[in-house]
Image (cartoon, rainbow, N blue to C red):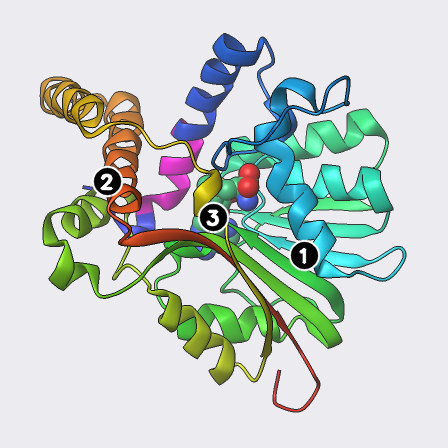
Amino acid sequence: MITHEQIPDFYDWLSRYVQLSNWLSYRDRFAAFTMHKRLDVPTQAGGASGRTAGLEYVNDRLLEVAGLPPEPRVLDAGCGFGGTVFHWQRRIGGRYDGLTLSRVQLRVARREARRRGIEDSCRFHLQSYDAALERDFDAVVAIESLIHSADLDRTVPNLASALRPGGVLLILDDMATGDLDRARPAEAALLRAHWGCARYPTQEDYRAALRRACLTLIHEEDLSPLMVPRDEHILDRWEGIYSKLHRAIPLSPVRTVVSAFLGGIALERLHGSGDVHYRLVVARNDGTGKA
Ligand SMILES: C[S@@+](CC[C@H](N)C(=O)[O-])C[C@H]1O[C@@H](n2cnc3c(N)ncnc32)[C@H](O)[C@@H]1O
Protein backbone atom coordinates (compact mmCIF):
# COMPACT_ATOMS: atom_id res chain seq x y z
CA MET A 1 0.00 0.00 0.00
CA ILE A 2 1.50 3.37 -1.05
CA THR A 3 0.19 6.35 0.88
CA HIS A 4 0.30 9.96 -0.24
CA GLU A 5 3.15 10.60 2.21
CA GLN A 6 5.23 7.88 0.55
CA ILE A 7 5.18 9.51 -2.92
CA PRO A 8 8.76 10.87 -2.51
CA ASP A 9 10.12 7.38 -1.75
CA PHE A 10 7.96 5.90 -4.49
CA TYR A 11 9.55 8.23 -7.05
CA ASP A 12 13.06 7.76 -5.68
CA TRP A 13 12.90 4.01 -6.23
CA LEU A 14 11.02 4.30 -9.49
CA SER A 15 13.59 6.80 -10.79
CA ARG A 16 16.41 4.38 -10.06
CA TYR A 17 14.52 1.60 -11.83
CA VAL A 18 13.74 3.82 -14.83
CA GLN A 19 17.45 4.51 -15.29
CA LEU A 20 18.11 0.77 -15.47
CA SER A 21 15.22 0.14 -17.84
CA ASN A 22 16.25 3.09 -20.06
CA TRP A 23 19.74 1.64 -20.24
CA LEU A 24 18.37 -1.73 -21.34
CA SER A 25 16.02 -0.19 -23.92
CA TYR A 26 18.04 2.77 -25.23
CA ARG A 27 21.59 2.26 -23.92
CA ASP A 28 21.01 5.65 -22.29
CA ARG A 29 20.17 5.88 -18.58
CA PHE A 30 18.19 9.07 -19.05
CA ALA A 31 16.52 8.65 -22.47
CA ALA A 32 15.31 12.23 -23.03
CA PHE A 33 15.12 12.71 -19.24
CA THR A 34 11.41 11.90 -19.31
CA MET A 35 9.29 9.74 -17.03
CA HIS A 36 6.01 9.80 -18.88
CA LYS A 37 4.27 7.47 -21.32
CA ARG A 38 5.93 6.58 -24.58
CA LEU A 39 3.55 7.29 -27.46
CA ASP A 40 3.37 5.65 -30.85
CA VAL A 41 4.57 8.42 -33.17
CA PRO A 42 6.65 8.17 -36.33
CA THR A 43 10.39 8.36 -35.64
CA GLN A 44 11.69 11.54 -37.22
CA ALA A 45 14.17 10.08 -39.69
CA GLY A 46 17.61 11.44 -38.90
CA GLY A 47 16.11 13.81 -36.32
CA ALA A 48 17.89 14.53 -33.07
CA SER A 49 15.20 12.73 -31.07
CA GLY A 50 15.27 9.58 -33.29
CA ARG A 51 14.82 6.59 -30.98
CA THR A 52 13.24 8.64 -28.23
CA ALA A 53 10.70 10.43 -30.48
CA GLY A 54 7.86 8.59 -28.69
CA LEU A 55 9.07 10.00 -25.37
CA GLU A 56 9.64 13.55 -26.60
CA TYR A 57 6.44 13.97 -28.61
CA VAL A 58 4.43 15.44 -25.73
CA ASN A 59 7.13 18.03 -25.00
CA ASP A 60 6.86 19.27 -28.59
CA ARG A 61 3.07 19.10 -28.70
CA LEU A 62 2.65 21.04 -25.45
CA LEU A 63 5.15 23.64 -26.58
CA GLU A 64 3.20 24.02 -29.82
CA VAL A 65 -0.12 24.69 -28.07
CA ALA A 66 1.37 26.83 -25.26
CA GLY A 67 1.94 29.82 -27.58
CA LEU A 68 4.71 31.20 -25.37
CA PRO A 69 6.40 34.60 -25.75
CA PRO A 70 10.16 34.74 -26.51
CA GLU A 71 12.38 33.82 -23.55
CA PRO A 72 9.44 32.67 -21.40
CA ARG A 73 9.44 32.05 -17.69
CA VAL A 74 8.09 28.55 -17.03
CA LEU A 75 7.27 26.43 -13.98
CA ASP A 76 7.25 22.63 -14.34
CA ALA A 77 5.06 21.28 -11.52
CA GLY A 78 6.30 17.69 -11.21
CA CYS A 79 9.37 17.87 -13.41
CA GLY A 80 10.83 14.37 -13.02
CA PHE A 81 14.39 14.33 -14.37
CA GLY A 82 13.77 17.70 -16.06
CA GLY A 83 13.07 16.40 -19.59
CA THR A 84 10.43 19.00 -20.46
CA VAL A 85 12.55 21.83 -19.04
CA PHE A 86 15.63 20.79 -21.03
CA HIS A 87 13.65 20.22 -24.23
CA TRP A 88 11.88 23.59 -24.10
CA GLN A 89 15.00 25.47 -23.03
CA ARG A 90 16.92 24.03 -25.98
CA ARG A 91 14.15 24.92 -28.42
CA ILE A 92 13.14 28.41 -27.27
CA GLY A 93 15.41 29.52 -24.42
CA GLY A 94 13.86 31.11 -21.35
CA ARG A 95 14.00 30.64 -17.60
CA TYR A 96 12.66 27.55 -15.88
CA ASP A 97 11.88 26.25 -12.40
CA GLY A 98 11.16 22.56 -11.91
CA LEU A 99 9.51 21.07 -8.81
CA THR A 100 9.83 17.46 -7.74
CA LEU A 101 9.35 15.45 -4.55
CA SER A 102 12.16 13.03 -5.43
CA ARG A 103 15.74 13.63 -4.29
CA VAL A 104 16.99 11.20 -6.94
CA GLN A 105 15.26 13.21 -9.69
CA LEU A 106 16.49 16.48 -8.21
CA ARG A 107 20.12 15.30 -8.28
CA VAL A 108 19.85 14.08 -11.87
CA ALA A 109 18.14 17.29 -13.09
CA ARG A 110 20.60 19.64 -11.37
CA ARG A 111 23.61 17.66 -12.58
CA GLU A 112 22.31 17.73 -16.17
CA ALA A 113 21.64 21.49 -15.96
CA ARG A 114 25.26 22.01 -14.84
CA ARG A 115 26.55 19.71 -17.58
CA ARG A 116 24.69 21.83 -20.17
CA GLY A 117 25.91 25.05 -18.55
CA ILE A 118 22.32 26.28 -18.00
CA GLU A 119 22.04 25.95 -14.22
CA ASP A 120 21.27 29.69 -13.87
CA SER A 121 18.28 29.53 -16.21
CA CYS A 122 17.06 26.01 -15.28
CA ARG A 123 16.65 25.64 -11.55
CA PHE A 124 15.24 22.61 -9.77
CA HIS A 125 13.69 22.44 -6.31
CA LEU A 126 12.61 19.76 -3.88
CA GLN A 127 9.21 21.28 -3.31
CA SER A 128 5.55 20.35 -3.53
CA TYR A 129 3.37 22.10 -6.10
CA ASP A 130 0.96 22.63 -3.19
CA ALA A 131 3.45 24.88 -1.36
CA ALA A 132 3.61 28.67 -1.90
CA LEU A 133 4.93 29.41 -5.42
CA GLU A 134 6.75 32.28 -7.09
CA ARG A 135 4.60 34.50 -9.36
CA ASP A 136 4.50 35.82 -12.91
CA PHE A 137 5.19 32.66 -14.90
CA ASP A 138 4.21 32.66 -18.57
CA ALA A 139 3.34 28.98 -18.28
CA VAL A 140 2.92 26.26 -15.69
CA VAL A 141 3.19 22.75 -17.07
CA ALA A 142 2.18 19.53 -15.29
CA ILE A 143 2.79 16.27 -17.14
CA GLU A 144 1.52 13.14 -15.34
CA SER A 145 2.02 14.77 -11.96
CA LEU A 146 -1.40 16.07 -10.88
CA ILE A 147 -2.65 12.51 -10.64
CA HIS A 148 -0.91 12.56 -7.26
CA SER A 149 -2.70 15.68 -6.06
CA ALA A 150 -4.62 14.98 -2.86
CA ASP A 151 -7.08 17.74 -3.80
CA LEU A 152 -7.30 19.37 -7.24
CA ASP A 153 -9.22 22.27 -5.71
CA ARG A 154 -6.15 23.11 -3.68
CA THR A 155 -3.50 22.30 -6.30
CA VAL A 156 -5.01 23.98 -9.39
CA PRO A 157 -5.69 27.39 -7.76
CA ASN A 158 -2.18 27.32 -6.32
CA LEU A 159 -0.69 26.70 -9.79
CA ALA A 160 -3.00 29.36 -11.24
CA SER A 161 -1.71 31.87 -8.69
CA ALA A 162 1.77 31.46 -10.19
CA LEU A 163 0.61 32.70 -13.64
CA ARG A 164 0.92 36.24 -14.90
CA PRO A 165 -2.21 37.62 -16.64
CA GLY A 166 -2.26 35.91 -20.05
CA GLY A 167 -0.15 33.00 -18.72
CA VAL A 168 -1.25 29.41 -19.42
CA LEU A 169 -1.57 26.23 -17.37
CA LEU A 170 -0.99 23.02 -19.34
CA ILE A 171 -2.07 19.73 -17.76
CA LEU A 172 -1.44 16.38 -19.43
CA ASP A 173 -2.71 13.39 -17.47
CA ASP A 174 -4.82 10.26 -17.34
CA MET A 175 -8.38 11.46 -16.73
CA ALA A 176 -11.37 9.24 -15.96
CA THR A 177 -14.54 9.64 -18.00
CA GLY A 178 -16.70 8.97 -14.91
CA ASP A 179 -16.58 7.84 -11.29
CA LEU A 180 -14.13 4.91 -11.30
CA ASP A 181 -15.05 3.87 -7.75
CA ARG A 182 -18.51 3.06 -9.10
CA ALA A 183 -17.72 1.96 -12.65
CA ARG A 184 -14.45 0.06 -12.08
CA PRO A 185 -13.98 -0.46 -8.32
CA ALA A 186 -11.29 -3.15 -8.65
CA GLU A 187 -9.00 -0.99 -10.79
CA ALA A 188 -9.76 2.12 -8.71
CA ALA A 189 -8.70 0.22 -5.58
CA LEU A 190 -5.48 -0.97 -7.27
CA LEU A 191 -4.59 2.60 -8.26
CA ARG A 192 -5.26 3.80 -4.73
CA ALA A 193 -3.19 1.00 -3.21
CA HIS A 194 -0.27 1.04 -5.62
CA TRP A 195 0.02 4.64 -6.80
CA GLY A 196 -1.23 6.46 -3.73
CA CYS A 197 -3.93 8.16 -5.86
CA ALA A 198 -6.79 9.58 -3.81
CA ARG A 199 -10.11 9.55 -5.68
CA TYR A 200 -9.18 9.22 -9.35
CA PRO A 201 -10.08 12.59 -10.97
CA THR A 202 -12.42 12.74 -13.93
CA GLN A 203 -12.14 15.06 -16.95
CA GLU A 204 -14.97 17.08 -15.43
CA ASP A 205 -13.09 17.34 -12.08
CA TYR A 206 -10.18 18.98 -13.96
CA ARG A 207 -12.50 21.36 -15.85
CA ALA A 208 -14.32 22.29 -12.63
CA ALA A 209 -11.05 22.91 -10.77
CA LEU A 210 -9.88 25.19 -13.62
CA ARG A 211 -13.18 27.09 -13.55
CA ARG A 212 -13.01 27.51 -9.78
CA ALA A 213 -9.44 28.81 -10.16
CA CYS A 214 -10.86 31.46 -12.56
CA LEU A 215 -8.91 30.12 -15.56
CA THR A 216 -10.41 30.01 -19.06
CA LEU A 217 -10.22 26.68 -20.87
CA ILE A 218 -8.65 27.35 -24.28
CA HIS A 219 -7.66 23.92 -25.59
CA GLU A 220 -8.48 20.24 -25.02
CA GLU A 221 -6.98 17.28 -26.80
CA ASP A 222 -7.14 13.51 -26.41
CA LEU A 223 -3.76 11.83 -26.93
CA SER A 224 -5.14 8.33 -26.15
CA PRO A 225 -5.12 7.24 -29.82
CA LEU A 226 -1.31 7.54 -29.72
CA MET A 227 -0.99 5.10 -26.84
CA VAL A 228 0.29 1.57 -27.34
CA PRO A 229 -2.16 -0.73 -25.46
CA ARG A 230 -1.23 -4.31 -24.59
CA ASP A 231 -3.69 -7.23 -24.92
CA GLU A 232 -5.72 -8.25 -21.86
CA HIS A 233 -4.14 -11.72 -21.72
CA ILE A 234 -0.65 -10.17 -21.60
CA LEU A 235 -1.81 -7.85 -18.82
CA ASP A 236 -3.29 -10.85 -16.94
CA ARG A 237 -0.01 -12.72 -17.15
CA TRP A 238 2.09 -9.78 -15.90
CA GLU A 239 -0.40 -8.95 -13.17
CA GLY A 240 -0.09 -12.54 -11.89
CA ILE A 241 3.72 -12.37 -11.88
CA TYR A 242 3.90 -8.94 -10.22
CA SER A 243 1.30 -9.86 -7.58
CA LYS A 244 3.35 -12.93 -6.60
CA LEU A 245 6.54 -10.86 -6.45
CA HIS A 246 4.78 -8.24 -4.35
CA ARG A 247 3.70 -10.85 -1.81
CA ALA A 248 6.96 -12.80 -1.84
CA ILE A 249 9.60 -10.06 -1.63
CA PRO A 250 9.14 -7.75 1.36
CA LEU A 251 12.05 -5.48 0.37
CA SER A 252 10.95 -1.89 -0.03
CA PRO A 253 12.69 -1.19 -3.37
CA VAL A 254 11.21 -4.26 -5.03
CA ARG A 255 7.74 -3.73 -3.60
CA THR A 256 7.75 -0.09 -4.68
CA VAL A 257 8.71 -0.80 -8.27
CA VAL A 258 6.33 -3.76 -8.48
CA SER A 259 3.59 -1.55 -7.03
CA ALA A 260 4.22 0.98 -9.78
CA PHE A 261 3.77 -1.79 -12.37
CA LEU A 262 0.58 -3.11 -10.78
CA GLY A 263 -0.89 0.40 -10.78
CA GLY A 264 0.25 0.78 -14.39
CA ILE A 265 -1.53 -2.43 -15.41
CA ALA A 266 -4.78 -1.27 -13.77
CA LEU A 267 -4.44 1.98 -15.69
CA GLU A 268 -3.79 0.17 -18.98
CA ARG A 269 -6.98 -1.85 -18.49
CA LEU A 270 -8.91 1.39 -17.89
CA HIS A 271 -7.45 2.89 -21.05
CA GLY A 272 -8.34 -0.27 -22.96
CA SER A 273 -11.97 -0.08 -21.83
CA GLY A 274 -12.17 3.67 -22.51
CA ASP A 275 -12.81 4.53 -18.84
CA VAL A 276 -9.66 6.67 -18.77
CA HIS A 277 -8.23 8.93 -21.49
CA TYR A 278 -4.81 10.56 -21.78
CA ARG A 279 -5.84 14.20 -22.10
CA LEU A 280 -4.23 17.57 -22.50
CA VAL A 281 -6.06 20.60 -21.15
CA VAL A 282 -4.80 24.15 -21.47
CA ALA A 283 -6.28 27.09 -19.58
CA ARG A 284 -5.39 30.77 -19.50
CA ASN A 285 -5.33 33.34 -16.74
CA ASP A 286 -7.37 36.14 -18.32
CA GLY A 287 -6.70 38.27 -15.29
CA THR A 288 -10.41 38.41 -14.50
CA GLY A 289 -10.40 36.47 -11.24
CA LYS A 290 -8.34 35.95 -8.15
CA ALA A 291 -5.86 33.82 -10.15
C1 LIG B 1 5.31 10.42 -13.70
S1 LIG B 1 6.47 11.61 -13.13
C2 LIG B 1 6.42 12.72 -14.50
C3 LIG B 1 7.66 13.57 -14.55
C4 LIG B 1 7.75 14.58 -15.68
N1 LIG B 1 6.63 15.49 -15.71
C5 LIG B 1 7.90 13.89 -17.01
O1 LIG B 1 7.01 14.05 -17.85
O2 LIG B 1 8.90 13.21 -17.24
C6 LIG B 1 5.55 12.47 -11.86
C7 LIG B 1 6.31 13.62 -11.21
O3 LIG B 1 5.41 14.31 -10.34
C8 LIG B 1 6.11 14.69 -9.19
N2 LIG B 1 5.14 14.97 -8.12
C9 LIG B 1 4.15 14.20 -7.63
N3 LIG B 1 3.49 14.85 -6.65
C10 LIG B 1 4.08 16.08 -6.54
C11 LIG B 1 3.87 17.24 -5.72
N4 LIG B 1 2.92 17.26 -4.77
N5 LIG B 1 4.67 18.31 -5.91
C12 LIG B 1 5.65 18.32 -6.84
N6 LIG B 1 5.89 17.26 -7.65
C13 LIG B 1 5.13 16.16 -7.49
C14 LIG B 1 7.05 13.53 -8.91
O4 LIG B 1 8.10 13.93 -8.04
C15 LIG B 1 7.50 13.24 -10.34
O5 LIG B 1 8.57 14.09 -10.66
Could you classify mark 2 by the number of other residues whose Cα lies within 10 Å: few (under 14), some (14-19), or many (20 or more)? some
| Rendered position, 273 above or below 164 | above
Name the residue located 65 percent from the left edge and 61 percent from the top edge: 140
Residue 24 forms part of the magenta stretch: no
Indicate the amino acid at tag 1.
Answer: Leu
For badge 3, the amino acid type reads Glu
Confirm whether the magenta stretch covers residue 7.
yes
- Asked if residue 24 is positioned above or below residue 268 in the image, the reply reads above
Image quarter of residue 262 = top left
Q: Which of 175 and 254 is in front in this view?
A: 175
**Residue at 58% of width from left, 8% of height from top?**
27
In the rendered structure, which segment of residues is drawn in magenta?
6-13
**Residue 119 seen by the camera:** no
Rendered position, 64 above or below 240? below
Amino acid bearing label 2: Arg
The residue carrying mark 1 is 75
Badge 1 local density, few (<14 within 10 Å), some, or many (20+)? many
- Name the residue carrying label 3: 144
Judge from the rendering whether residue 100 lies leftward or rightward of residue 194; answer left or right: right
